[in-house]
Image (cartoon, rainbow, N blue to C red):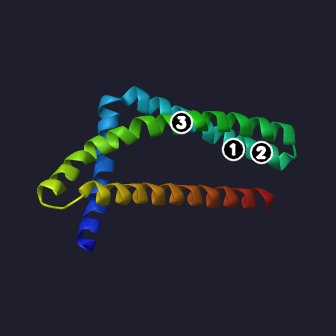
Amino acid sequence: MNYFLIFLTLLVAVIVEKIEELVAIRFFSSYVLDIARMEAEIEEYKELSMLAMLSGDREAYRGFQDMMNEIYGRVFFRKISFFTPLYFLLLSPYIVALQFLGVENSLSIVLPVAVLYFSAKLFYGMVRDFVKSYVDYRKANN
């Protein structure tokens, strides 16, 4: 397999993601703002649950966690149902261009690279949030 093609596909995946953000903000701003509002609520409940945990109030902690999980589920599935089709719609000209240039099974190259990119980005975000929460917890206990 050509490593240049994989690198180019990864670069295109990143660029298309940025274009997707611009398109979403430009044409679907109310939807994006609604998701941002819910993400702010998640952060608020996260802070409140940490305060409840530090104060030893297990019932409040569980309540805030439940509320946070409920909102997170809605945000997650809204993002998946909206941004994934938009992303691949914007990525499809690249797939067609590769096919036109003679790359056989261009979809079988582009799709795994795009999924790998998003998986790595998701994993990085999860690790970053975990480390941030751990640091906040350590600061609160000291």
Give the class, few, some or many, for how many residues have Cα within 10 Å of label 2's Cα (few <14, many ≥20). some
Q: Amino acid at mark 3?
A: Val
Counting residues from the start of the chain, the first of labels 2 and 3 encountered is 2
50 w.r.t. 28: above or below: below
Residue plotted at (12% across, 54% down): 100
* Residue 21 at least partly seen: no
Q: Amino acid at mark 1?
A: Glu
4 relative to 142 in the view: left or right = left
Asked whether the residues under the numbered discs 1 and 2 touch, taking CB atoms below 8 Å apart as contact, a structural biologist would say yes
Q: Which residue is mark 1?
A: 47
Q: Quadrant of residue 82?
A: top left
The numbered mark at residue 75 is: 3
Residue at the outermost front position: 104
Residue nearer the viewer, 64 or 106: 106
From the viewer's perspective, is the residue at label 1 or at label 3 nearer? Answer: 3
Which amino acid lies under the numbered mark 2 shown in the image of this protein?
A: Leu
Q: Which residue is mark 2?
A: 51
**Relative to residue 95, is residue 82 drawn left or right?**
right
Q: Give the spatial CA distance, label 1 vs label 2.
A: 6 Å
Q: Residue most toward the top?
A: 30
SS at circle 1 = helix
